[in-house]
Image (cartoon, helix red, strand yellow):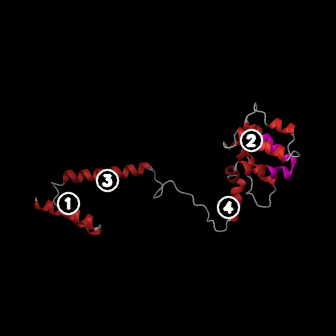
Amino acid sequence: MGLTPPFTPTDSFCEQLTEDSTFLKHDPRLDTEVVDKLILQLNRIYPQILTDKEATKFRNLDVPTSVRLGELLTHLQGKGEEACREFYRALHLHVEEVYYSLPTRLHLRDSLDPLKLPRVIKQRHALNDRGPLFFMGCFTFVVGMAFFYYYSEAKVTGGSRALGMAALGLKRKAQEVLIWYTEESLIK
């Protein structure tokens, strides 16, 4: 599968339809009813683009919708520029949300918007790329240190004073709690 260059406003409707074909064939919003509306629109309003016989062929319900749509798109590309342009008009008329989500429409909208900033790709890990095991290791270490401090507090007399000194860099509420805890352990 080759990569196609981005759509430019000077590309023909046939070239746009070639680029959009894969998207259109796989879009679930283009169900049987919508495809039939598109075929009928092209057949009734532009019989030179899609004759009655061709419309009947493309409306055959025994063939899956994506296959019928693919054959219709190929047929329209063979008919020329005007047929492709009228298909886009019918698509815009009947399923506007699909029309505006076409790859060529998105390229056009992005290329014509001078104020649009380049897209920023969100990273999975905002602070680091070490993953969940690193987090679990750090968390386990902190919990271990907390247990060690809790169970060895009675034996270590300087521990509570160190806790009081650690309070110097904290906010007011945290300082009050740590200093209160330090003073309480000194009273014992």
Mark with earlier residue (2, 1): 2
Mark with earlier residue (4, 1): 4
Mark with earlier residue (3, 1): 3
Identity of the amino acid at label 1? Gly
Disc 4 from disc 3: Cα separation: 48 Å
As displayed, is residue 114 above or below residue 22? below
Label 4–label 1 contact, CB within 8 A:
no
Choose mark 4 or mark 1, whichever is in front: 4
| Residue with the mark numbered 1 | 159
Q: Quadrant of residue 68?
A: top right
> Is any atom of residue 36 visible in this view?
yes
- 22 or 72, which is in the foreground? 72
Label 2–label 1 contact, CB within 8 A:
no
| Residue with the mark numbered 2 | 35
Mark with earlier residue (3, 2): 2
Disc 3 from disc 1: Cα separation: 16 Å
Which residue is situated farthest in the front direction here?
44
77 inside magenta stretch? yes
Which residue is situated farthest in the left direction here?
188
| Residue with the mark numbered 3 | 142
Q: Which residues are magenta?
A: 69-86
**Secondary structure character of the magenta stretch overall:** helix
Identity of the amino acid at label 4? Asp
Task: Assess disc 1: are there few (<14), some (14-19) or many (≥20) residues with their C-alpha within 10 Å of its C-alpha.
Answer: some
As displayed, is residue 20 above or below residue 175? above
Label 3–label 1 contact, CB within 8 A:
no
Q: Residue at x 40, y 51 (%)?
A: 135
Identity of the amino acid at label 3? Val
Question: Residue 11: percent from the left, percent from the top?
Answer: 80, 58
Identity of the amino acid at label 2? Val
Left/right placement of residue 56 relative to residue 168 reads right
Task: Assess disc 3: are there few (<14), some (14-19) or many (≥20) residues with their C-alpha within 10 Å of its C-alpha.
Answer: few
